[in-house]
Amino acid sequence: MKKNMKKITVMLITIISVCMLIACGNVVENLEETVEVNTQEVVTEEVVTEDATDTLDYEKLVDLESKNNILVDVYNEVASLAVANGWEADSLTVEELNAADSIILINNSVITDQTNITNADVDELISTAEEITAVLDTNTRAKVSEVYTVSE
């Protein structure tokens, strides 16, 4: 049962990652200009996206950057534990960590360049970062905290 839950968790993370890559793939390909976001200071200006009906809220970008930084910290801790305890030999764990890394890369690209990004996109990225962080910080951390042994 525990093994099935692990597979379900990994598959869920993989599906979420693939959906995010598909959803953001077109956006990332069309990125044209870079806007720096300063996390020390909330900028109150708004950027008009390609669809002039939706203006991008910089506070949401600051929130995304904050959630992504938390995800990066948890990812680094869990990945270090996984390597220290031999979990790089487990393909499901590697896929799970790779999925989290993909989410981090997508978030970084959106934080760096917001062209063609909507508030709804940012909200979805924030939600995904929170979900992935929660899974890594609980299930994955608990699993990789133990020494990896091949189960037969």
Image: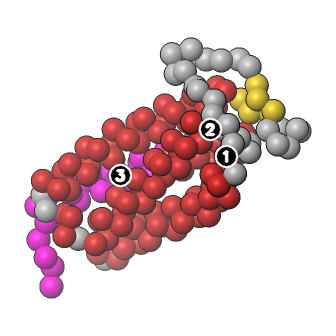
What residue appears at the point 19 percent right and 63 percent down from the top-left corner? 87
Give the CA distance from mark 1 to mark 2: 7 Å
Can you identify the residue that label 1 sits on? 31
What residue appears at the point 33 percent right and 47 percent down from the top-left corner? 75
The region drawn magenta spans 130-152
What residue appears at the point 46 percent right and 67 percent down from the top-left corner? 14
Circle 1/circle 2 CB separation < 8 Å:
yes
In the visual, does 99 lie left or right of 62?
Answer: left
For marks 1 and 3, the one nearer the N-term is 1
Could you tell me residue 141's position as x and y percent? 26, 52
Type of amino acid at the residue the image marks with label 2: Asp
At mark 2, the secondary structure is: loop
Can you identify the residue that label 3 sits on? 136
Can you identify the residue that label 2 sits on? 113
Residue closer to the observer: 31 or 149: 31
Could you tell me residue 69's position as x and y percent? 42, 35
On screen, residue 36 above or below 89: above
Quadrant containing the N terminus is bottom left
Quadrant containing the C terminus is bottom left
On screen, residue 63 above or below 141: above
Type of amino acid at the residue the image marks with label 3: Leu
In the visual, does 113 lie left or right of 136?
Answer: right
At mark 3, the secondary structure is: helix
At mark 1, the secondary structure is: loop
